[in-house]
Amino acid sequence: MAAPLTLLLIVAVTIRAALYRSSLADLISERVEVVSPLTAWKRVVEGLALLDLGVSPYSGDVFHETPLIIYFFHFLVDYAEITFMLADVITAVALYMTVKDYNKQVFRKQKYALEADRYPLDCLELIRSPKEMYYIPLKVAMFYLLNPFTILSCVAKSTCGLNNAVLALFILSTIKGNVLLSAVFLSLATYQSIYPLTLCAAALLYLMQRQYIPVNYRRASFWWFIAQYAFMYLGSLFVIVCLSFFLLGSWDYLPSVYGFILSVPDLTPNIGLFWYFFAEMFEHFRLFFLCVFQINVFFYTIPLSIKLKEHPVFLIFMQLAVISIFKSYPTVGDIALYLAFLPVWSHLHRFLRNIFLVSCVLLTCSALFPVLWHLWIYAGSANSNFYYAITLLFNVAQILLVSDYFYAFLRREHHLTYGLYLKRKDGSEATLVLK
Amino acid sequence: MAAHRCSYSAFLLIICSLSRFFVADSQETTLTGDNHAAEVDNPQTATETAGQTAEQPAVEEKLWEATEEATPDDADTDKQDTSTPETAAPSSVPQPKDDFQEELVIRPLHSGDIYTSFQFRTLWETDFMRGNKVSHYRLFPKSLGQVISKFSVRELHISFTQGYWRTMQWGQPFLPSPPGAELWVWFQDSVTDVDGTWKELTNVLSGIFCASLNFIDSTNTVQPSASFKPLGIGNVTDHRFLRYATLPREIVCTENLTPWKKLLPCGSKAGLAVLLKSEKLFHSSFHSQAVHIRPVCQDWQCKTTSWELRQTLNVVFDLHTPGQGKREWSLFKMFSRTLTEACPLASSSKIYIDITDNPQGEQFEVSPATPLLGQAMVLGDRRTFSVYDLTHQITFGTVRSLNLLIRWKSSEGDMLRPLLHGERYVAGYGLQTGEIHTLMYNNHPYRSFPVLLLDSVPWYLRLYIHTLTVASKGKDNKPSYIHYQPSKDRVRPHLLEMLVQLPPNSVTEVTVQFERALLKWTEYTPDPNHGFYVGSSVISSLVPSIVAMDTNSTREQPLFSSFFPCKEESSYFVRVYTEPLLVNLPTPDFSMPYNVICLTCTVVAVGYGSLYNLLTRSFQIEEPSPGLAKRIANIIRKMRGVPPL
């Protein structure tokens, strides 16, 4: 397995290196779909330039990266291309290892269930074979590395690639069962962009499952584990935040990074739902709708955790998708991360209802983004509504994709419990509905 | 020190003029050229020289020569009865507590246009800042006096300009000003809440001048660190007390002129101000009116200070319209008025006509001819003027009205190119990014000089300072000083100040990239597709003077004065304003707020709905519901106690 992975990495790095050398790199790095005000490389360079001029990068409204990023690139600015390629490679390898480990566990669980005769007899075709699972880790790495979204994001040097790497490392350390590293990487991801906070529920569920701690709020061990994890998480977050304070000597970065994420003052168009909505918002409703939209990301965490408490990895996937749809400055790099998990759920394909339609819409929208952007901004023959319409459609497609996978997952679980070919009372073939 | 320097320069001027005209005035012979010559002439010079103690020489400073000499071809009788009262008046009358002077400078431009510059100066020896309230106003306008004392203003400069001054065609103006409104104020260092005071002050000035100065807020106010030094006395240069703002979109018209005229002691009833009729003043290529208030020294030792209010009005008339045929102009033609008297309250009231380019009368002819000639250093150049003193009845002649008339004979002659000149434009296409190019021309053949460039760019053009390049002659020209304050969205603009050395005979190009922001729909102007204005860049510099540039020794000069090329007045201060920019921003669809709110909320609801659906419901086998007839039958069967169908 190492050889194909190495080959894949070489191909991916070659593509990126070639694109860095081409004239496309400048074009890509200006694309609003690829870079947001939070992640644009141009703004990182601006922050470094401000630092060189002796001006605090947070005194203006151009730089919104965290202090650690600016110090990271203070030393690595000349090796930025290598850094971003490396970040992608790290993400891919981490996802590869994660999925490999996860598949082993899935297989083991399936084996126990089979031995215990827990599955209905007609569910044999739902049972996953090691053969079909063998290439899934490689497919995941490939889905991440060769996804045009990831490539664009990497060539644009969007710092989203770094955030993805941190998230991938978090998922890896969670799957490997390393509580401390999981908490540290989660706090790092939270520090980078608040939203990964919602992943802590999934991490807790997984780690408890792994350590055979029952998810029962009457049990002391449950609360003790949560306290442990929270302590590690908050502790490392505290350390990181204080470190940032000592690097810059001021708390200016808090409003400039987190205030910026939460209050959405920059209405630069992107693929998300926020920009046009808040450009057209009536001023006195602004705060209300801001809260409504921001709550969306955090709102689904608890119900999803309850529903998916047996399947924390799927919960991680769902959370990543929800974050990338409802976050305030989404880019295609965020989407690429959760799209990379799709091969893991390849066994759900028989239950997907509208995958063809959704993938067509996603592809068409991705092609139409630059076209309508050009018509609006450069040709002047279209207006902002055109671009806005495409972002709406793109988000609808993403929502449908995610909910479709959620539906398929739930349905498979239902079948695994009640059998695949369900019969009505009168013996005719039954259809399954949600009630 | 500066006073000595000036008197020395005045002395040199006298030498030069003596050698040129070979006619010594009767009074002039008593001054044997020693160093106190400059103080004897009139109080104006004394205050001017004392005013120079300020760090930065004022642009408009003119070192009036002590003598007013008659040209050789003038009649001797003229000379006697005009020069005697002129020199006698100021020295005999005791110094009044306040003093008003008015003057009009007319300069025929090479482009065929006429540049007329009115200056009205009120000096008042008082102290607004002392605790006792100043309540008795004579010449000084009460409205401004109250503003000064209420807001603890140390210096106030305000200008309203319609049109753009074309430096390359017209040369340097006496008082530069950017298109639109410009306001810069130095507050006393006793002011604690400078921003609050500034906000109140702009609102008050907005009322006084009937202008939209109330639109000055933190988003277009900057605190330049080096470009705007106080012009009056006082050496506090902490730029925390300075506020500078421009409104490039401001349109200047009659409603701004009327309150401005009301500040004059004579209003528009008498004196030069009768010429200020708006129907003619605004029928011009360039119109600029300004008010400058600053503390100046009363005497050359600067023991007492007085407040100077200088009201200026600069107009460029385009009289060279096709169809008129011959080129000539007169006061009546320009202003549709003639002059009949000086303002009775004015201690001096004069008209100057720049005849430097016309020494022998070969280009144009001025009538009525005047016996008085004056010389002055204006913007590094030695200019000769015909002087008409309105305080003498003889000026108005027998018809009791003065209508100056210039008739052109030839249209030749070329202008010396201004040594410093700036241009600015936006490059790039599309509504996403762009690049601001600022070009600074140094037309001096062999000397380089440093300039201070000030750029204040609104927040919605996000500047990227790392893309800043400064290049002259194709080479990188690193600024020796950069002061950059990045913008805050909806709070404050970008401020970029830098000191650049301009190599001789070169163009220096400053470029910086920016990104156009999408604003909230309520933040756009009512005509958003017209674009947004960005105020002029300000280029301030000490420019080597033209006199010092003069290397040909053909002119007859004493040998001892011409060995070292650079004299004391080797450089002069110049401020050049570039064009304002008009930048388009991407716009949302303004008719769509309800639609957008509905559609986006629908998408969010789709997300919520589909997840809610899956979260709360469970899978069940669909049992087909029985038909209506069957259900009714079942109910009946149930009542009968029979098992249902």
Image (tube, rainbow, N blue to C red):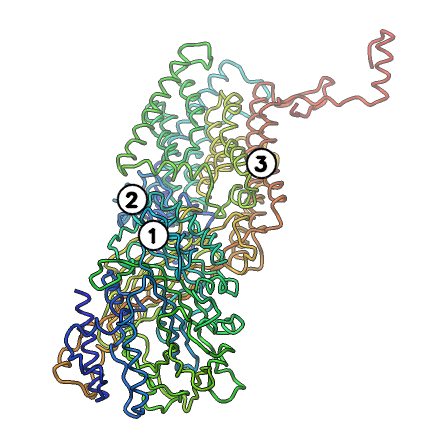
The answer to whether B40 is drawn above or below residue A193 in the figure is below
**Depth check: A372 or B451 in front?**
B451
Q: CA distance from mark 3 to mark 1?
A: 63 Å
Label 2 chain ID? A
Q: Are marks 2 and 3 on the same chain?
A: no
Task: Give the left or right position of residue A35, taking residue A90 as reference.
Answer: right
Nearer the viewer's eye, disc 3 or disc 1? Answer: 1
Q: Which mark is residue B604?
A: 3
**Depth check: B446 or A426 in front?**
B446
Residue under label 2: A73
Mark 3 crowd level (few <14, some 14–19, many ≥20, 10 Å Cα): many
**Depth check: B198 or B98 in front?**
B98
Q: Which mark is residue A200?
A: none
Percent coordinates x, y for residue A340 in the rendering: 45, 37
Which secondary structure, mark 3? helix
Q: Earlier in the sequence, mark 3 or mark 1?
A: 1
Circle 2: residue type: Phe
Which quadrant: the N terminus of chain B? bottom left
Percent coordinates x, y for residue A259 in the rendering: 42, 37
Q: Which mark is residue B128?
A: 1
Q: Are marks 2 and 1 on the same chain?
A: no
Circle 3: residue type: Val
Q: CA distance from mark 2 to mark 1?
A: 55 Å
The answer to whether B316 is drawn above or below residue A319 in the figure is below
Task: Give the left or right position of residue B464, taking residue B24 as reference.
Answer: right
